[in-house]
Image: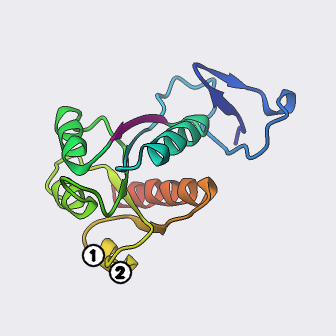
């Protein structure tokens, strides 16, 4: 496994980089496209931090400020989004409504729900089709682990 840090459009060799918290990503010499994550959260600072951190971890990131925007992006890009990281409680359409929409998609992305306070528990989220439910606050490492587990589980099903 290669450890690298993706910065903007290139990879940085961690042996030459003083940065900490490197996470394993696919080999930078491969022609494989990075996986795409749709981050859905009504808090701009959360979207920005997650977009930056997931981008640094090697993911391509798009984001939406609410469930309605997320559903529009999912419809426009069906089959092109690999994961959705969605807050549960948001205005316009909430994360549960996004999850219900995703369950109707032919090429549905894996979903990790995030929430600081919610009536939705892990078992309910899994029953609705989410790969995981992560409680805020969380470390980026916890979120990346949840995404990797979702990817591994989807490959077992495929």
**Is residue 114 or residue 122 the one in the foreground?**
114
At horizontal 50% and vertical 65% (from top left) the residue drawn is 136
Residues drawn in magenta = 60-64
Does residue 52 appear left or right of residue 92 in this picture?
right
Secondary structure, magenta segment, majority class? strand
**Where is residue 47 drawn, in percent x and y?**
44, 43
At horizontal 18% and vertical 32% (from top left) the residue drawn is 76
* Above or below: residue 136 compared with residue 111: below
Does residue 33 appear left or right of residue 23 in this picture?
left
**Where is residue 117 drawn, in percent x and y?**
40, 72
Q: CA distance from mark 1 to mark 2?
A: 6 Å
Identify the image quadrant of the C terminus.
bottom left
On whether residue 63 falls in the magenta region, the answer is: yes
Residue on which disc 1 sits: 127
| Residue 119: mark | none
**Is residue 158 or residue 90 the one in the foreground?**
90
Q: Secondary structure at mark 1?
A: helix
**Where is residue 34 drawn, in percent x and y?**
48, 32
On whether residue 70 falls in the magenta region, the answer is: no
User: Is disc 1 in contact with disc 2, using a CB cutoff of under 8 Å?
Assistant: yes
Q: Residue furthest left?
A: 104
Tell me which corner region of the image, top left, top right, bottom left or bottom right, holds residue 23.
top right
Residue on which disc 2 sits: 123
Q: Secondary structure at mark 2?
A: helix
């Amino acid at each position: 496994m290669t450890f690298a840090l993706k910065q903007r459009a290139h990879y940085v060799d961690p042996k030459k980089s003083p940065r900490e918290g490197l996470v394993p990503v696919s080999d930078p010499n491969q022609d494989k496209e990075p996986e795409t994550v749709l981050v859905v959260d009504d808090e701009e600072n959360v979207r920005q931090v997650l977009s930056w951190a997931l981008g640094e971890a090697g993911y391509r990131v798009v984001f939406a400020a609410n469930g309605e925007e997320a559903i529009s992006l999912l419809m426009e890009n069906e089959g092109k989004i690999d994961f959705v990281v969605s807050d549960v409680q948001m205005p316009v359409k909430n994360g549960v409504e996004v999850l219900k929409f995703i369950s109707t998609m032919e090429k549905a992305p894996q979903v990790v729900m995030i929430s600081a306070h919610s009536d939705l528990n892990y078992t309910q989220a899994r029953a609705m089709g989410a790969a995981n439910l992560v409680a805020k606050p969380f470390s980026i490492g916890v979120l990346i682990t949840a995404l990797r587990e979702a990817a591994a589980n989807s490959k077992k099903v495929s």
